[in-house]
Image: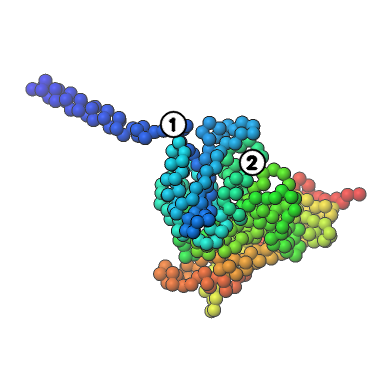
Amino acid sequence: MVEKEEGEIVYIRLILGTLLLSMGIFLSGCNGARESEEVAYIVAIGIDKAEQEGMIKVTYQIAKPNVEGNKGEGEKDTVLISNSAVTIAESLNLLNSTTSLVPSMSHVKVLVVGQELAREGLANFWGSLKRYREYRGSMFVLVAKGTAKDFLEGNKPSFNISASKYFETMLDSGIEAGYYLRVSFHQFYIRLKSNSAESYATFVDISSLSGKGDVATPRVSGSKIDGYVAGGIPLQGGNPIEFAGTAIFNGDKMVGILSTTETRMMAMLLGNFNNGFLSMEDPLVTKKFVNVNLRLGAAPKIKVALGEEHPVIDIKILLEGEITNLPSGINYEQESYLRLLEEQVNQVCHEEMANMIQHTQELKSDVIGFGYYVRPEFTNYQDFLQYPWFEEYSQAKVNITIDTKIRRTGLMIRTYPVK
């Protein structure tokens, strides 16, 4: 009897072992594996309006497997391939028919949209990008002033860096000055469907490298900084590609561009402003300038109330600063003088922020997302949906309070004039 039971146990173990071995073979996932030399890793996609009616031109920037991340001197690490199709899915089929490698979108860093197509609207193809699993929600969205194809062709990094790493580091470095903001495809898509905020994207263009600039927004009273957009920065040498300003949308259509100074104010209101230099007039010697390195001292405080006629938006911003340059030699480290610098920062930032908000109101584009703050005014979400927020936003009264505290004076505790 005991021998019979032991035999049954051995038999059961044998069956279980066979099943586990079979599962290991069939569930290993290696049947679909490909060597890296067999895959066309796409690092950037550009979408433009095609010459043919109802079609789009799609440009793929594909990394060469043998040089990606290990580019030799004078050797390009990517290749550009363009085709025209009715949909992005068909464009991908055409790409697969013209290259010996299997296209993969799982490593796409940026999605570049030409300005003409952005102004016509993105709704026709945006949903298909969100639905297909290979398009990552983490890829960044850019709007090119000309065409996306020209932008990708004109990108010539000055340093020995791969194309994917270039886009990644460029968009990461935007927080250092606040002159352009990065936005992921997922963030863009969420706002595209939202009734509380409009979408925005990084604005890019190709510089002429002439050294001549084109001011987009003139400096406000007391400031020494002009506002630029990509393509208008006075640049000479290096990579001609410029990241500057923000493309703003109304629904799925691009309706305007915020300059670098306006984008910085937008970053403050979004709570995404890390730090940046502000150059302004010396309060006591207006021909001289003062440099202050600013950062947010706390998250912005925003309150939106439904007024008798139109909404009322109250904004409170706390900034902290560090003095980095005092050419006049005046001892602004002294408390009585320090307050003059803080008031100067308050005035400059207040005027720049008011101008930026007025600009978005004229375009009926709430890219800040004030609509999220007005929701508590309604008893339920359905009541909010029936409220024409974007129309009301254009008529809203905005109250702005800027409070600056200069906490540090750099490596000097007292300034003496130059003899």
Does residue 229 appear in this view? yes
The answer to whether one can see residue 265 in this image is: no
Return the residue nearer the eye: 95 or 303: 95
C-alpha gap between disc 1 and disc 2:
28 Å
The picture places residue 75, in percent across and down from the top left corner, at 61, 34
Q: Position of residue 19 (x, y in %)?
A: 23, 30
Q: Amino acid at mark 2?
A: Pro
User: SS class of the residue under badge 1?
Assistant: loop
**Where is 23 relative to 300, above or below?**
above
Residue 275 horizontal/vertical position (percent): 65, 51
Q: Residue at x 62, y 68 (%)?
A: 358
Label 2 neighbourhood size at 10 Å, few (<14), some (14-19), many (20+)?
some
Q: Which residue is mark 1?
A: 35
Foreground pick, 418 / 279: 279
Instruction: Residue at the far right: name it.
Output: 419
Residue 225, image quadrant: bottom right
Q: Where on the picture, by quarter, is residue 35?
A: top left
Amino acid bearing label 1: Glu
The relative height of residue 390 versus residue 296 in the rendered view (above or below) is below
> Please, which residue is most extreme toward the left here?
1
Residue lying furthest top? 3
Identify whether 150 is placed above or below 367.
Answer: above
Mark sitting earlier along the chain (1/2): 1
Residue tagged 2 = 157
Q: Nearer the viewer, residue 100 or 232?
A: 100
Q: Provide residue 180's location: percent of width, then percent of height.
A: 62, 53
